[in-house]
Image: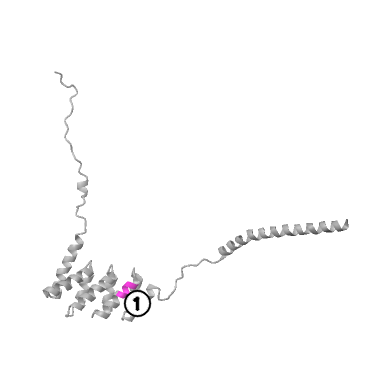
């Protein structure tokens, strides 16, 4: 009897250990994913880092303007006011290095331009084509034009075939440029306030209350 009881006790312990092991494995499987999710949520999320590296457009703008002789105050103000500071500094740098226009004059025009790169292309293109010293005039005309690249192509093309004077060619092309842009404006004339208050009048013949009988 003692031997039988001992065997039964060992079998019960073995079964109990097996059941406990299964329960332990299931518990681990349930809690490990939860702990992993909790740990992931506790980690700091990556943010957008603001750095002073050369990926910063304002640093590139200020450094490029200083390299062409613009003062620190003018460079700071110009870059801060620019919507595209990198393009602004590139415009000033191209004009200063490839023409006889001073960097301070170029900065004022590039700040006013809608597309600084197009302005620089215009000034550099005309200055390279014209042998006379008309760099300042080219800067002025290109800044006035709403389509500076098209304007420069007009000046260079006319001078190549007609040998027109630089200023005459620029006068002709600036007028043509304005007309080309005005062609995209709406052709209708909006009604004035007095016109809007006019009400149409319709003449009507009243119907007789007692119509005639034959």
Whole-percent x, y for residue 120 in the image? 26, 74
> Which quadrant is the N terminus positioned in?
bottom right
Determine whether, in the image, residue 18 is placed left or right of residue 34: right
> Which quadrant is the C terminus positioned in?
top left
Mark 1 crowd level (few <14, some 14–19, many ≥20, 10 Å Cα): few
The quarter of the picture where residue 20 lies is bottom right
Report the magenta residues as a range: 86-90
User: Among all residues in the image, which is located at the extreme top?
Assistant: 214
User: Among all residues in the image, which is located at the extreme right?
Assistant: 1
Which residue occupies the foreground of this view, 158 or 31?
31
Residue that mark 1 sits on: 73
Determine whether, in the image, residue 37 is placed left or right of residue 100: right
- Residue name at image x 33 percent, y 81 percent: 67
The quarter of the picture where residue 209 lies is top left
Which residue occupies the foreground of this view, 143 or 33?
33
- Residue name at image x 66 percent, y 58 percent: 26
Whole-percent x, y for residue 58 in the image? 38, 73
Q: How many marks?
A: 1
């Amino acid at each position: 009897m003692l031997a039988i009881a001992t065997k039964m006790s060992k079998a019960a312990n073995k079964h109990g250990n097996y059941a406990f092991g299964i329960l332990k494995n299931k518990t681990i499987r349930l809690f490990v994913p939860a702990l992993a999710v909790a740990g992931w949520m506790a980690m700091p999320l990556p943010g957008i880092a603001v750095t002073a590296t050369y990926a910063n457009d304002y640093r590139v703008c200020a450094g490029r303007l200083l390299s062409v002789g613009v003062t620190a105050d003018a460079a700071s103000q110009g870059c801060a006011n620019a919507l595209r500071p990198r393009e602004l500094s590139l415009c000033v740098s191209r004009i200063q290095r490839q023409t006889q226009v001073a960097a301070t004059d170029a900065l004022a025009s590039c700040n006013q331009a809608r597309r600084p790169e197009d302005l620089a292309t215009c000034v550099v293109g005309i200055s390279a084509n014209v042998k006379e010293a008309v760099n300042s005039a080219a800067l002025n005309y290109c800044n006035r034009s709403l389509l500076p690249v098209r304007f420069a192509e007009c000046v260079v093309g006319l001078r190549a075939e007609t040998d027109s004077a630089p200023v005459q060619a620029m006068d002709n092309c600036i007028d043509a440029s304005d007309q080309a842009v005005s062609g995209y404006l709406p052709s209708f004339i909006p009604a004035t306030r007095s016109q809007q208050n006019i009400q149409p009048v319709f003449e009507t013949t009243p119907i007789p209350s007692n119509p005639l009988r034959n």
